[in-house]
Amino acid sequence: TKIIQILPSNARYILTQANIPRALNVKNLCQMFEEVGLNVFLVASNVDSAIDEAVLSSKSQETIFIIGSIFVVGEGLHHLQILGYK
């Protein structure tokens, strides 16, 4: 929760969970974000869907950050490579 509290309030957040059994449930994560007043733009069912939505909804030259566990970041980077991003 402490890390969530230092995230920028002017960003749009797309939340998801890693594809591992011990991943934090995305509904619980969403509640944590809402408790500190952060804008949850979308709750995605998996990392690939979250990445797809981030790419589709971002403006040209807008930065997309993938944050979370090493599992979430790893899944996100893998999906970006499949999409052709380096």
Image (cartoon, rainbow, N blue to C red):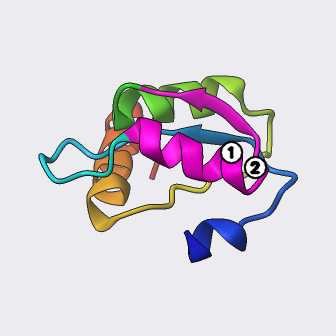
Q: Looking at the image, which residue sits at the far left?
A: 21
- Name the side, left or right, on which 13 lies relative to 60: left
Please tell me how crowded label 2 is: few (under 14), some (14-19), or many (20+) other residues with Cα within 10 Å.
Answer: many
Q: Name the residue under label 1.
A: 34
Q: Mark 2 points at which residue?
A: 38
Q: Where is residue 37 in the image (x, y as percent from the top left)?
A: 79, 50
Name the residue: 80% across, 45% down. 61
Q: Identify residue type, mark 2.
A: Leu
Name the residue: 37% across, 52% down. 77
Q: Which of 27 and 18 is in front in this view?
A: 27
Q: Is residue 35 magenta?
A: yes
Looking at the rendering, the stretch of residues picked out in magenta corresponds to: 26-44
Determine the secondary structure under disc 2: loop
Name the residue: 35% across, 44% down. 81
Q: Where is residue 2 in the image (x, y as percent from the top left)?
A: 59, 76
**Residue 9 against residue 44 in the figure, above or below:** below
Quarter occupied by residue 5: bottom right
Q: Is residue 5 magenta?
A: no
Determine the secondary structure under disc 1: helix
Q: Which of 4 and 54 is in front in this view?
A: 4
Badge 1 vs badge 2, beta-carbon distance below 8 Å: yes
Please say whether residue 74 is visible from this viewpoint: yes
